[in-house]
Image: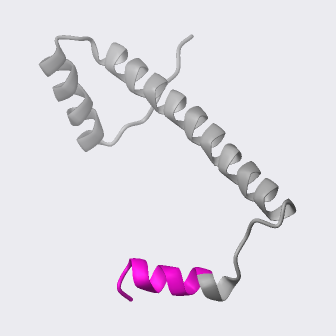
Amino acid sequence: MTITLNLSPDLEMKLQNKASQEGKEINQVITELLTALLEWEIEDSKEAIKGIQKGLTDFESGNYRSFDEFVEEQYEKYNL
């Protein structure tokens, strides 16, 4: 598949430099970067969904604290 992108000169230069440093074609570098980004995004979404589900399960089972307790913990944790 062919995709045409309009890149800023700065981004194009960074990609070209990275390709040169790694001894690769710029298309290969772009493909590797996009692949890594998409894999990270998928994993990040899965982790977020797991966290939300855990929170809902905890809430449904009565395992939660008041907002005031949460705020107090944050103040202590971050020296606010």
Up-down relation of residue 18 to residue 77 (above or below): above
In the image: residue 71, left or right of residue 16: right
Residue 73 in the magenta stretch? The answer is yes
Residue 11 in the magenta stretch? The answer is no
Query: Who's the residue at 33% across and 42% down the image?
Result: 8
Query: Who's the residue at 45% across and 86% down the image?
Result: 75
Task: Give how far across and how far down residue 14 sits, in percent.
Answer: 22, 35
Taking depth in this image into account, of 70 and 19 the one nearest to the observer is 70
Colouring scheme applied when the structure was drawn = one colour
Which image quarter: residue 65? bottom right
Taking depth in this image into account, of 38 and 2 the one nearest to the observer is 38
Query: Who's the residue at 23% across and 11% down the image?
Result: 24
Up-down relation of residue 17 to residue 77 (above or below): above
- Range shown magenta: 70-80
Query: Who's the residue at 48% across and 80% down the image?
Result: 74
In the image: residue 63, left or right of residue 43: right
Quarter of the C terminus within the rendering = bottom left
In the image: residue 25, left or right of residue 1: left
Quarter of the N terminus within the rendering = top right
- Residue lying at the far right in this picture: please name it: 60
Which image quarter: residue 11? top left
Task: Give how far across and how far down residue 68 sits, in percent.
Answer: 64, 89
Which image quarter: residue 41? top right
